[in-house]
Amino acid sequence: MNSASAAGGLLKSDALLRAIEGAAEVRRRHQFFNWLLSKVGLFLPDQLAICGAWSPSHRTLVFDQFNSILLPEATLAELTGRTSVLLQRVVDEWVRREGSVCCLPLAAIDSDMTRPYLEQLSALGIHQLLVHGVSRPQRADAIETLFMFASRDVAIDEGHLHAMALIGPHLHLTYRRMLNFEFSLGPQFSIRTSAQAPGPAETGLLTKRELQILALVRDGLSNARIGAQLGISPLTAKNHVQGLLRKLGASNRAQAVARGLALEMMPGADVQAANVALQASKTLHESSGALPAEQRATQDPNKPDLPAPPVSRQTRRSS
């Protein structure tokens, strides 16, 4: 092993240790997806993150999505739906592999019914799913939790499989603890559906161009890449970003995305969770001495903040 490989291995080991240590602090839903983004995402593909847990009250697996990329609504529904054929094929493949951490090529779950959704994932650059979960001893089909991860144009390798095997038990415990804690808070903390949320027409805060740029910021694009995609200069893109930060009262890109999600400016948002995440993000940056948006204008315009993934409304899938 050369020195570069050894250094990379040490960095991944350190990131894994920090993720395990940070898991102990997770109690709320917004803390869980921030943990996924800032800790687990350092060594696992996490732009697509589907998490499911067995619900004793519903006697079925209940799935959430914690994504940092935009998905077509039909595909998102299929990845979290109550009667999802795609999810059932993922479950069947994982059980067939005796409940071991695995890399599932999309071809392994291809069928006439799943093909339209798989084609949409492929068009986004997602060709494999990293899958692992926890089931009862000697019963791989009695699933307690199941997790699926992927990122655009990321080939899942042995390092990902090894890291997933190590973090898997902590994912299980952390996710279950979060669900139990949220349940203990009572029905007033149930997730608000998009039908109850204000739509973008009600907010009127951003121009059409700023909404376009906000969506690209959510995808993690730098000012230079935003400019290239929209046919404007990086400086113009930077000015647009700074403008929408001011309008949204955000001190960084992650806060802007969270605020945009809370106001239903982008699809796939959970309003209550996004608002909680926004407040948590503000508290974190205030405590760390982060500069407000106006004072950060002189920073590198091509360096994006990490995008903040939304948490969709909780959905159910029949077993």
Image (spheres, rainbow, N blue to C red):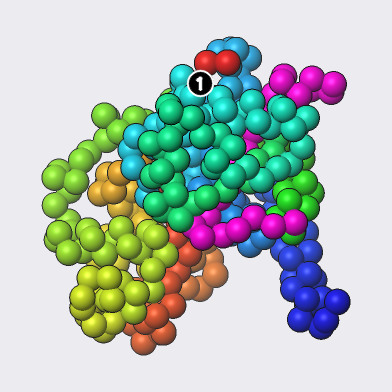
Q: Which residue is mark 1?
A: 317
Q: Is residue 265 visible?
A: yes
Residue 118 lies, in percent from the top left, at 45, 40
Residue 90 relative to residue 64: left or right: right
The quadrant of the picture occupied by the N terminus is: bottom right
The residue drawn where x is 59% and y is 55% is 45
The residue drawn where x is 85% and y is 21% is 138
The quadrant of the picture occupied by the C terminus is: top right
Tell whether position 184 is magenta.
Answer: no
The residue drawn where x is 48% and y is 30% is 111
Residue 7 lies, in percent from the top left, at 78, 77
The residue drawn where x is 23% and y is 60% is 212
Asked if 253 appears above or below 59 in the picture, the reply is: below
Residue 277 lies, in percent from the top left, at 45, 49
Residue 245 relative to residue 166: left or right: left
Residue 308 lies, in percent from the top left, at 45, 55
6 and 68: which is toward the camera:
6
Mark 1, other Cα within 10 Å: few <14 / some 14–19 / many ≥20: many
Q: Is residue 27 visible?
A: no
Residue 267 relative to residue 308: left or right: left
35 and 131: which is toward the camera:
131
Instruction: Read off the magenta span.
Output: 134-158
Asked if 59 appears above or below 186 in the picture, the reply is: above
Asked if 58 appears above or below 225 in the picture, the reply is: above
Q: How many marks?
A: 1
Could you say whether the residue bearing mark 1 is in a helix, strand or loop? strand
202 and 67: which is toward the camera:
67
Secondary structure mostly seen in the magenta stretch:
strand
Q: In the rendered structure, which amino acid carries the disc numbered 1?
A: Arg
Tell whether position 143 is magenta.
Answer: yes
